[in-house]
Amino acid sequence: MKLKMFATVLCCSVMVVTAGMAGSVTAEAQAAAAAPKPKYVSPPATASVKLNDAEITITYCQPSIHGRTIFGGLVPYGEVWRTGANAATTLKTTGALQIGDLKVPAGTYTLYSLPTQDSWKLIVNKQTGQWGTVYDKAQDLGRTAMEVGSSATPVEMFTISFDKTMGDSTVLHLKWAGVDASVQISAVK
């Protein structure tokens, strides 16, 4: 009984304090709070690396597994995938790159991927600024094969990262669920 009375008094005290504060909120602040805001379930992320002759930045959004079957389910095999969520995943490089067997001049591009049950391809596309599901094959700069491995433990949030960075080379990783797709990247002069 005492706990119930304490909770009632606490609740009433909070309501009184909140009501007293309401008069101090400006009309502009109230309007801003009421305005609809985009709510992304998949948060934005950035992966970047500096090589001797190029700086690379990848901007993307991180979807989560949420108990779903990812590859062969949410991301169908044999179909181009946006390689993230929300807006298209962007690759910016200040220098020319060799990504796998694909030559990529300095500039800004969109990354897509093509997963199948036994292989992956990374797609570098010249169209930029679009929503992730907007894909124009005619804008492809090219495609390159990726090595596909598995993660020791499932990765809940899709992650793009670099490792084994030395001088002018690094390895790009796309990790999600139990998959780790990777490709060698080198800066070229």
Image (cartoon, helix red, strand yellow):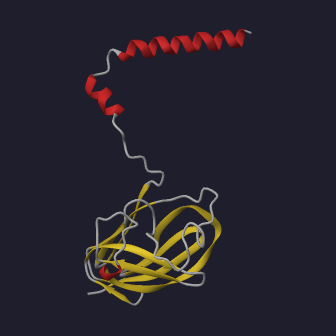
Name which residue lies at 28% across and 79% down: 53
Residue 154 in sight in this render:
yes
Relative to 148, residue 60 above or below: above
Which one is nearer the viewer's eye here, 166 or 49? 49
Q: Give the image quarter of residue 47.
A: bottom left
**Which image quarter holds the N terminus?**
top right
Residue 164 in sight in this render:
no
Q: Position of residue 123 (x, y in %)?
A: 40, 80
Relative to 3, residue 96 above or below: below
Q: Give the image quarter of residue 119.
A: bottom right
Relative to 120, residue 133 above or below: above
Q: Position of residue 56 (x, y in %)?
A: 33, 72
**Which image quarter holds the C terminus?**
bottom left
Q: In the drawing, does residue 138 fall left or right of residue 159? A: left
Q: Position of residue 41 (x, y in %)?
A: 48, 51
The mark tally for this picture is: 0
Which one is nearer the viewer's eye here, 95 or 15? 15
Q: Position of residue 182 (x, y in %)?
A: 50, 79
Q: In the drawing, does residue 169 fall left or right of residue 54? A: right
Q: Give the image quarter of residue 73.
A: bottom right
Name which residue lies at 50% across and 65% down: 159
Name which residue lies at 56% across and 77% down: 77
Q: In the drawing, does residue 91 fall left or right of residue 164? A: left
Which one is nearer the viewer's eye here, 97 or 51? 97
Name which residue lies at 62% across and 75% down: 150
